[in-house]
Amino acid sequence: MWGVIRQKTQSIRPAFSAIRHFSSAAKEITVREALNTALDEEMSADPKVFLMGEEVGEYQGAYKISKGLLDKYGPDRVLDTPITEAGFAGIGVGAAYYGLRPVVEFMTFNFSMQAIDHIINSAAKSNYMSAGQISVPIVFRGPNGAAAGVGAQHSQCYASWYASCPGLKVLTPYSSEDARGLLKAAIRDPDPVVFLENELLYGESFPVSAEVLDSSFCLPIGKAKIEREGKDVTITAYSKMVGFALKAAEILAKEGISAEVINLRSIRPLDRSTINTSVRKTNRLVTVEEGFPQHGVGAEICTSVIEESFGYLDAPVERIAGADVPMPYAANLERMAVPQIEDIVRAAKRACHRSVPLVAAA
Amino acid sequence: MSFTATKFAPSPLPLSSTTPRSNDKPLSFSFDHSKANPSSSSFLGSTRKLLRFRAPAKPRSSSPVAAVLLQQTSNLLITKEEGLELYEDMILGRFFEDKCAEMYYRGKMFGFVHLYNGQEAVSTGFIKLLKKEDYVVSTYRDHVHALSKGVSSRAVMSELFGKATGCCRGQGGSMHMFSKEHNMLGGFAFIGEGIPVATGAAFSSKYRREVLNQADADQVTLAFFGDGTCNNGQFYECLNMAALWKLPIVFVVENNLWAIGMSHLRATSDPQIWKKGPAFGMPGVHVDGMDVLKVREVAKEAIGRARRGEGPTLVECETYRFRGHSLADPDELRDPAEKEYYAARDPITALKQYLAENNLASEQELKAIEKKIDEILDDAVEFADNSPLPPRSQLLENVFADPKGFGIGPDGKYRCEDPKFTEGTAQV
Ligand SMILES: Cc1ncc(C[n+]2csc(CCOP(=O)(O)OP(=O)(O)O)c2C)c(N)n1
Ligand SMILES: [Mg+2]
């Protein structure tokens, strides 16, 4: 279309196939590769899937998630849009009404603010308003959460914003396995999915099994994953904070505290059952998120535990969140505004130590 | 290269698809045509630099044009003092950004840093005509707009270093330069977002004059933004309201042909942005944005119009950025021939030549300006480097206008001194 100058790009597929064919031992792929291969495979499996967004084509994606896809699928299925989030998000919804499966990339989720009308009003509510006549199989995806050094407008977590809206499914991958399995699930799902990636994780490598690399691999939506088993305290986290929680758990282990780390994977639906089962075992809960504390994911998890497992709690629930301020630019202030591993460690210890006298008394 | 409107540097690129616009009939256009010499027009619209891309099939010459036809330079366009002021401001913009690149690579600043190199004629050409009370609203590419508006190099550099002495005490950063003192209303990092805010600033001037009877409220607002932004709805919404309410604003489009890696031609059904002015009932003007004197002529008219209460103007400045979109951009998609074409039209070189050819400034005078700016920037870097980091207390202070009750508790203590507050558990 329009005489595009196509950049020469190598496809990243060969690397991936090599992994698949030569060994079943654990291999590592980056989150970026996981997302790229998931998109690639779903586009190749279903011609109704197309990708649309700013710089997804010739530029290969602002964060190179769509690398090679323009070359492979052409400009009719990999569409570079003008900078008009409200416009192209709405166009995506309209296309999804009539059977297509758009994947709409926001260069970052911050910019979805200009499209939020269509995400909430057009995508999330249509199935209900039309009494089930019109479903909206669309995926809104892109990097979300605190980035580094970019100030208040470019550094924010939208998980709780979108998760408070009925009609949306909200997924938050952490590892390469999550990224592949959840993105495939999102694309195949008949409902609108908000898919929150994290820029700072794109380059991270994770081991993946042969099963994860299989093109049929898919994860269930609404199911959390226990990343690490433990018995003293439950730590819930999503996206980048799962890595922080795992590091905190290692530190805690050295001090004799055994933490169970739950990777939520899905913020809506929320896997209440996995969370509550864990809390009933450990009797203590620390929730971790990067977003603002008020009305956040932690608040929702806390409610769920109070409703279902109140009698099992041996300590007040601890909530770790970003500071209740817009993100400052200065590096020293920025560090104070986002949760750190030490914060998680301290909160977990507080939860455990507070209960010590009680246990002793019992 | 001279600054007469009649000469264009010969293009290294094939000129096949351009249509001279001199046949076009100017529409109701309130700029002064009496001095214009239509036969001297070589206005080519936006098509010129897009030559190397396969041009869209549609001819671009059909609609009425409101082009600016400059007076022949029988009289000089500027005085010596003006010339030196413009030169100094452009050198400041250029050298400041070069310094930023250096400091970024040394790890002194972080995140997204978008530099303005190549576009100086627009900032200087417009902002140097403003009064201090006038407003400027910018984007993430805002350092140089802030400097032209009078924010000191020290304050901008310190902000970029994330220091407490920055113009926003290190809280805003590269993309968010605010200065109430200088009526610099921000760096807005989202596309299109600054345009309604600027329109609101213009609204406030009109409101103060007409509703609050403040006779001296004649401030003009300049909204700066890029070509890519002209595909965003907020642009059109504001053109409409500004024209509808005759607001004192100038919409200044810095058309540098690219929005990150998206060529303007691939993003826009009709690439001539200035045309959108007449569609909303305001003049639309195209000007060579690599020529500070042409920009200044157009700016004078548009700012004057706004000041006189005659309403808004849309100005499309054809310009080019000499660096990548930001310091993180590999800049692989722009054609080297295109870059060379615009490099040859460097606005600073052009002004220098004009000053020399017209005996307005000697080589030594210009060198002295460059030396002065070098010193100012060395001082700014030293100042920023030696400035303190923002204290912890700053983190909560400015969430609301009154920090009491939020940043500062009933006991008068900063809430952020509570060790739990970075854990999100502190009550705020
Ligand atoms: C709403 C929104 N969407 C996307 C972006 C990401 N983005 C930043 S700059 C840019 C390109 C802007 O191009 P243009 O308006 O031509 O200005 P230039 O950078 O060329 O000065 C984009 C897409 C953004 N900042 N805001
Ligand atoms: Mg541009």
Image (cartoon, coloured by chain):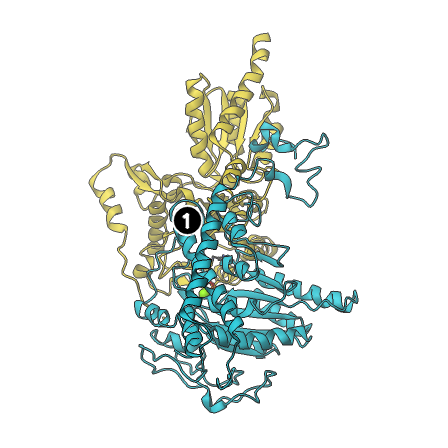
Chain colours: A yellow, B cyan
**Rendering quarter of residue B151:** bottom right
Image quadrant in which the C terminus of chain A is located:
top right
Q: Image quadrant of residue A312?
A: top right
Please rate how many residues cluster around mark 1, counting C-alpha atoms within 10 Å: few if below 14, some from 14 to 19, many from 20: some
User: Disc count in the image?
Assistant: 1
Depth order, front residue of A335/A297: A335
Q: Where is residue B314 in the image (x, y as percent from the top left)?
A: 56, 74
Q: Give the residue pinned by disc 1.
A: B103
Q: Where is residue A93 in the image (x, y as percent from the top left)?
A: 51, 59
Q: Which chain carries label 1?
A: B
- In the rendered image, is residue B407 in sight? yes
Q: In which quadrant is the N terminus of chain A drawn?
A: bottom left
Q: Residue furthest left?
A: A22
- Looking at the rendered structure, the kind of residue marked 1 is Met
Q: Which of A248 and A72 is in front in this view?
A: A248
Q: Looking at the image, which residue is at 22% across and 43% down?
A: A21
Q: Quick check: A8 above or below A206?
A: below
Instruction: Tell me where residue A181 appears, x and y as whole percent.
Output: 39, 43
Residue A242 placed where, x, y %? 45, 34
* Quarter holding residue B424: top right
What residue appears at the point 33 percent right and 51 percent down from the top-left corner?
A: A41
- The answer to whether B220 appears left or right of A280 in the picture is right
Mark 1 CB in 8 Å range of ligand 1?
A: no
Q: Can you say whether B369 is above or below B268 in the image?
A: above
